[in-house]
Image: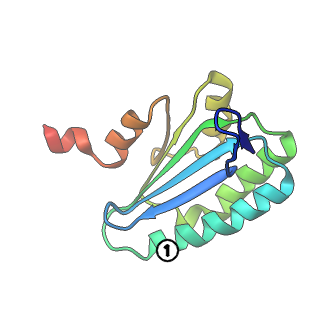
Amino acid sequence: MEDPREGKVVSKFEIILDPHRRLLTVTLRGFWDVQTYCDYDAEVTAQLRRLNQLKAAKACLVDAREFSIQSKEVADLMVEGVAKRLSFYPERTARVVSCAISHSQAARMGKSSDQRVYDSVDEALDWLLDRRSAAA
């Protein structure tokens, strides 16, 4: 995917593990085909396994603000993938989206109280890292 502002190729996903904060940050961009999903599935599974090996509370932030509404085929693969990896997901997972339709698609990904959908990264990080309770 090319960034029109800079003419650079931008990855359709980025996965960064911060072991100090015990936080896995996943950034999703653009419209995916099945091969992109398969590449993502392998990488996110590997990183979730690494996160799962860390001690103490862990969290996962999925930033999907630049993620397009996906085809039914890819959306179904994503739901199946989350279900398949459920045992690897940390205590808390937050998804950040930019519109109501994306909110609905993200809500399909996780249906427990340990997974929430937000409109801003700051709100999501507050919940993931318990910043509000620490400040109180």
Query: Residue at horizontal 32%, vertical 40%?
Result: 126
Q: Percent x, y for residue 65?
A: 59, 34
Residue drawn at the location 49% of the way across and 74% of the way down: 50
Residue at the image point whose x is 66% and y is 58% from the top: 83
Q: Which residue is at the front of the view, 133 or 111?
A: 133
Find residue 72 and report its horizontal and vertical position in percent: 85, 40
State which quarter of the image contains the N terminus: top right
Which SS class for mark 1?
A: helix
Q: Which residue is mark 1?
A: 50
Colour theme: rainbow
Q: In the rendered view of the protein, which quadrant contains the C terminus?
A: top left
Left or right: 98, with 69 as reference point: left
In this rendering, would 75 be left or right of 25? Answer: right
Whole-percent x, y for residue 105 in the image? 68, 35
Mark 1 crowdedness (10 Å alpha carbons): few <14, some 14-19, many ≥20 = some
Name which residue type carries label 1.
Arg
Horizontally, residue 77 falls left or right of residue 7, namely: right
